[in-house]
Amino acid sequence: DWLLGQGDGYVVTPSAISRVQWAYIPPTQLQALNNGGQPELAEWPEFRAEDVGLDLDDGRAGWSYTGEEMAVSLVTAHLGHGRPTLVRSLEAAGLGRPGSDRAARLLELGRAANTWLRESGYTLCITDPNMEHRNGYTGEELAVALITALARQGRPALQQAMEAAGLGRPGSGRADRLLDLGRVAAQWLRENGYTLNTADWVD
């Protein structure tokens, strides 16, 4: 790409964007300089990462994801969550807050890994029985989250419903996590042929 008409350009790689100076000659001028000779370089040489200081045997994935990031991505995909939940989970795990592109690529890898595990007969499970209650959600909170998800409502409705039920008004982060759990449960119920009949709740 031409920048400022001075031969400036950008080299875009997966890990960096570098500004460079190009010795660019337009095709018309290049043809005018042709005196019948043959170019010294018939084709571009094969790229070797080692020549530019890249070590491909350092154990890193192509996008330099850590094992911890991949683990969070796999669990996120297994639970059926999306990118916002992945971003929050990474941040809560002390792994930083990735940008949208990096999070999308990471989630794509997690989903691919989860699909392979499922198709190969594997699944993820919680080995610590106390792990499920680490966030301290009560049964009442989860019930309100499930009803909100089944009604296809969002976070404001969940917060209002919890407040009306005397459960307090959760912050946005906690409400989002609760709603994610409610949506996963609602999806599982629908996919397995279950439904909730509100008529049964009327006394």
Image (cartoon, grey):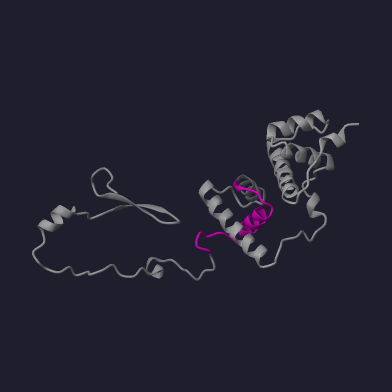
**Which segment did they paint magenta?**
61-83
Residue sitting at x 14%, y 53%: 28
Image location of residue 123, percent across then percent down: 71, 62
Q: Is residue 158 left or right of residue 13?
A: right
Q: Is residue 96 left or right of residue 1?
A: right
In screen coordinates, is 53 left or right of 86?
A: left
Would you place residue 194 above or below residue 36 in this image? above
Task: Tell me: 194 left or right of 112.
Answer: right
Q: Is residue 203 magenta?
A: no
Foreground residue, 69 or 190? 190
What is the residue that sits farthest to the left in this orientation? Answer: 35
Looking at the picture, how far across and down is residue 140, in whole percent? 83, 39
x and y percent of residue 83 in the render?
60, 47
Quadrant in which the C terminus appears? top right
Q: Give the tally of numbered discs.
A: 0
Q: In the rendered image of this protein, does residue 147 appear above or below residue 1?
A: above
Instruction: From the viewer's side, name the closer residue of 146 and 26.
Output: 146
Image position, residue 44 (x, y; %): 28, 67
Q: Residue at x 56, y 49 (%)?
A: 98
Q: Nearer the viewer, residue 50 or 123?
A: 123
- Residue at image position (72%, 61%) is 124
In magenta segment, residue 71? yes
